Amino acid sequence: MLRLGVNIDHVATIRNARGGLNPDPLRAAQQAIAAGANGITAHLREDRRHIRDADLAAIKGGINAPLNMEMAATDEMLRIALETKPNACCLVPEKRTEVTTEGGLDVAGQEAHLSPIVAALRAAGIRVSMFVDPDAHQLEASARLGADIVELHTGAYAEGRAGELERLIAGAARAHALGLEVHAGHGLTYDNVSAVAAIPQVMELNIGHFIIGEAVFTGLDVVVREFLRLMNLARQ
């Protein structure tokens, strides 16, 4: 079964643009799950530009589905993750100046730093995912560290760069061979999701920006159901 995780960060972005309580990320998470989403992703950034600490707690307590917390590999985020106890934590690179996550985490270059963070999360019963480019040395480093999952960064593919689909296909096969569960995400839309969904080793897609943007026009439940339809059709 190919699962869909819905990233609700940008519901919080809209809320924070004006302040106050609306729109509520928890309500979006609940509606996405009611429409068939298999889980919810939320990225707690250092600058709290969208999701806030209280959002994480509310979502964790208010949904009957897995919560995937995206986080930088810092002591602060580790502490919050251990307090929140999400189903999974996805370690991502993070820069204050970036609009969105730019590329995958350099796991191979940061093994010494990442090792105790991965160990602490796993000891707490939290599944650990690495958000990486589909490069063999990053996948191998993720396996050495004991990660459960790699989420392949699909941004370059979504931008239409030549050869990127082939890199994703090869990366998914390599990750699977290493014993890693394979997820994928970043920049996926109605127009480009099918080729990634068709990669047999990919078990989950995490999609956010397009879903929230398209929901303005057609409704969140409609967008979630359409992604599920396209994903299932690609798998068939």
Image (cartoon, helix red, strand yellow):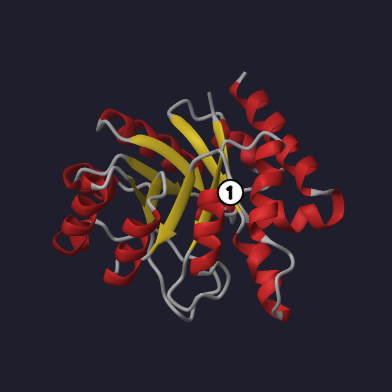
> Which residue does the numbered mark 1 point to in the structure image?
62
Which residue is most to the front?
A: 61
Q: Residues within 10 Å of mark 1 (few under 14, many from 20)?
A: few
Q: Position of residue 187 (x, y in %)?
A: 59, 54
Residue plotted at (16% across, 58% down): 116
Q: Element under label 1?
A: helix
Q: Is residue 219 found left or right of 1 in the rendered image?
A: right
Find residue 143 and report its image quarter.
top left
Residue 206 vs residue 155, the one in the foreground: 206
Residue plotted at (55% across, 33% down): 3
- Type of the residue with mark 1: Gly
Residue plotted at (29% across, 69% down): 74
Q: Is residue 46 above or below residue 171?
A: below
Q: Position of residue 165 (x, y in %)?
A: 50, 41
Q: Is residue 3 found left or right of 137 in the rendered image?
A: right
Find residue 111 and report its image quarter.
bottom left
User: Do we see residue 157 in this rendering?
Assistant: no
Q: In the picture, which quadrant includes the C terminus?
A: top right
Residue 68 vs residue 170, the one in the foreground: 68
Which residue is most to the top?
A: 236
Q: Position of residue 110 (x, y in %)?
A: 20, 63
Q: Is residue 2 above or below residue 159?
A: above
User: Do we see residue 148 in this rendering?
Assistant: yes
Residue plotted at (69% across, 62% down): 24
Q: Is residue 2 found left or right of 103 in the rendered image?
A: right
Q: Position of residue 136 (x, y in %)?
A: 27, 44
Q: Is residue 190 above or below residue 81?
A: above
Residue 39 vs residue 150, the one in the foreground: 39
Which residue is most to the right?
A: 217
